[in-house]
Image: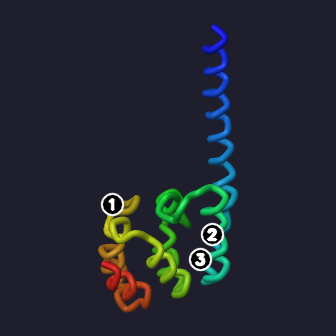
Amino acid sequence: MLKIVKASLVIAGTFCVSSVAHADVSEALANICTIVQADDKGELRKKMRAVQSDYRMKLKDYYSGVSCSGNSLIRTAMLNNAVEAGELLVKKMPKSDLKAPEADGKTLQAWVAENGLQDSPIAAVLQERL
């Protein structure tokens, strides 16, 4: 009986910690859209390092969960002509994730072509990676 009580306390404690950690990650990433829009590569790199060291999460782990006015981080960088931040994001993402469809079902390449952003320096870096 005592083992069951201990086990259930451990399980309950684990769920509480994971929900708190999720909230903390959200707070840590709260201003990442602003950083990308401002094209602040140094601050973006600091933010990514902090999230990785504090929560052991790489960009690919939280990229799909971050939305800036309905756009992903790379799309936001392209729309705001944030070349340095956009190039950093493209270089840090795995190639397989760059090829995968985003929340709206379109790949980055298809979205770039649809919006006429092929001349963007970020699109050139994206094309090189793929």
- Residue drawn at x 52%, y 87% is 83
CA distance separating discs 3 and 1: 22 Å
Q: Nearer the viewer, mark 3 or mark 1?
A: 3
Q: Are marks 2 and 1 in contact (CB under 8 Å)?
A: no
Q: Which mark is residue 49?
A: 2
What residue is shown with label 3? 36
Q: Amino acid at mark 2?
A: Arg
- Residue drawn at x 37%, y 88% is 124
Looking at this view, name the residue that lies furthest to the front: 3
x%, y% of residue 63?
Answer: 50, 63
x%, y% of residue 69?
Answer: 55, 66
Q: Which mark is residue 73?
A: none
CA distance separating discs 2 and 3: 15 Å
CA distance separating discs 2 and 1: 29 Å
Specify the quadrant of the image occupied by residue 109. Answer: bottom left
Q: Is residue 79 above or below residue 12?
A: below
Q: Is residue 3 above or below residue 35?
A: above
Q: Report crowding for label 3: few under 14, some 14 to 19, many 20 or more residues within 10 A (C-alpha).
A: many
